[in-house]
Image (cartoon, rainbow, N blue to C red):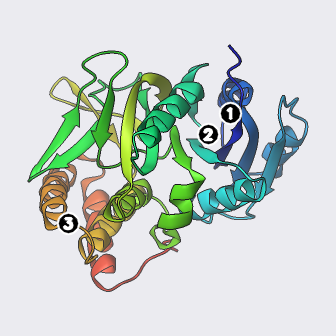
């Protein structure tokens, strides 16, 4: 069976990528899609030269942004290019992801099966594995005041989720036309969460596809705490995480139960990283600054 999906365009966002890792991603995804657009967030000229010389199986377009404009802006640029190519779907990737050879076709089949039932599909996403961490099931559903991880009871399960991480996320162009693009003022963090919840508020639903597999590095090197591993982030990423979370809580369309459930987790993270992330005072200050900036409406890139 041919795995190439001509109506799907891949949008890959790069920021100072390791070229070997990027090459693995391109080698894996190209046989599965009709074209690839790489949107580069201010990497060196050598990255663009490398892309220009790449031996591509399908159309490969590199769009430099000449500076780090943020992941949301880069995704929007790639989506607009794919729209101009009359793509039916886009699939988003970070440069450090690596999809299985049949990931796209399984995502596409799941999306089409849901649409055949009359469901407005926002997105379907892959089940990712971060080999550096002790992976919990990656699919999240907020129910009442609980944040539940949706387990894959069988290999072919398709589970209802509140949102999906962007990388490995297949989105019908129709959903983007109705819901709109990514919120560029968020810059990074909560971009995918905000879009997924905004889509849900408009009657579009997201699903995790257990059979669609992908490796993906989530965050920096894992954080070791009492014999367990947790995803970790830089102090700067903590700034964006806390700022954008609080910005989300201020949106009138967001359900109250989601604000309360996610807000409680944010409080726990604030305490945990203030005590244990190193250097502690830097992480504490960046998280606090992020909260303050959200309350006064200061968004976009932190200069």
Query: Which label lies toward us, 3 or 1?
Result: 3
Residue 206 position in % (x across, y down): 38, 46
First of labels 2, 1 by sequence position:
1
- Which residue in the rendered view is the most extreme toward the bottom? 296
Location of residue 240 (image quadrant): bottom left
Q: Give SS at disc 3.
A: loop
Q: Name the residue tied to disc 2.
A: 95
Q: Give SS at disc 2.
A: loop
Visible residue check, residue 267: yes
Residue 60 position in % (x across, y down): 82, 41
Q: Depth check: give the residue in front, 253 or 262.
A: 253
The answer to whether marks 2 and 1 mark residues whose Cβ atoms lie closer than 8 Å is yes
Visible residue check, residue 16: no
Query: Which label lies toward us, 3 or 2?
Result: 3
Specify the label residue 22 is tagged with. Answer: 1
First of labels 3, 1 by sequence position:
1
First of labels 3, 2 by sequence position:
2
Residue 291 position in % (x across, y down): 27, 72
Mark 2 residue crowding within 10 angstroms, few (<14) / some (14–19) / many (20+): many
Location of residue 164 (image quadrant): top left
Q: Name the residue tied to disc 3.
A: 255
What distance separates the C-alpha of mark 3 from that of mark 2? 32 Å
Q: Give SS at disc 1.
A: helix
Q: Is 6 placed above or below 85 here?
A: above
Mark 3 residue crowding within 10 angstroms, few (<14) / some (14–19) / many (20+): few
Mark 1 residue crowding within 10 angstroms, few (<14) / some (14–19) / many (20+): many
Specify the label residue 158 is tagged with. Answer: none
- Which residue in the rendered view is the most extreme toward the front? 117
Location of residue 24 (image quadrant): top right
What distance separates the C-alpha of mark 3 from that of mark 1? 38 Å
Residue 123 position in % (x across, y down): 46, 46
């Amino acid at each position: 069976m041919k795995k190439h999906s001509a109506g799907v365009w891949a949008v890959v966002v790069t920021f100072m990528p390791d070229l070997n890792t990027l090459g693995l991603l391109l080698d894996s995804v190209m046989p599965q899609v009709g074209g690839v657009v790489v949107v580069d967030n201010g990497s060196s000229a050598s990255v663009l030269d490398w892309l220009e010389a790449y031996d591509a199986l399908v159309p490969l377009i590199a769009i430099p942004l000449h500076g780090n404009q943020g992941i949301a802006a880069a995704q929007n640029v790639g989506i607009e290019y794919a729209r101009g190519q009359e793509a039916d779907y886009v699939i988003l990737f970070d440069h450090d992801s690596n999809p299985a050879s049949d990931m796209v076709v399984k995502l596409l089949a799941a999306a089409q099966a849901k649409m055949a039932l009359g469901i407005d599909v926002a997105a379907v996403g892959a089940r990712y594995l971060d080999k550096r961490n002790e992976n919990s099931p990656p699919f999240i559903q907020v129910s009442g005041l609980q944040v539940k991880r949706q387990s894959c009871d069988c290999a072919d399960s398709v589970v209802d989720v509140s949102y999906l991480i962007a990388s490995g996320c297949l989105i019908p162009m129709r959903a983007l036309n109705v819901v709109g693009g990514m919120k560029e003022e968020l810059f990074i963090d909560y971009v995918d969460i905000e879009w997924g919840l905004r889509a849900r508020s408009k009657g579009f639903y997201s699903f995790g596809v257990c059979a669609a597999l992908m490796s993906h590095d989530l965050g920096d090197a894992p954080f070791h705490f009492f014999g367990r591993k947790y995803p970790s982030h830089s102090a700067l990423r903590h700034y964006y995480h806390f700022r954008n979370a609080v910005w989300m809580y201020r949106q009138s369309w967001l359900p109250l139960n989601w604000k309360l459930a996610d807000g409680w987790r944010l409080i726990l993270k604030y305490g945990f990283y203030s005590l244990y992330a190193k250097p502690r005072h830097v992480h504490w200050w960046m998280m606090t600054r992020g909260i303050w900036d959200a309350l006064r409406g200061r968004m976009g890139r932190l200069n």
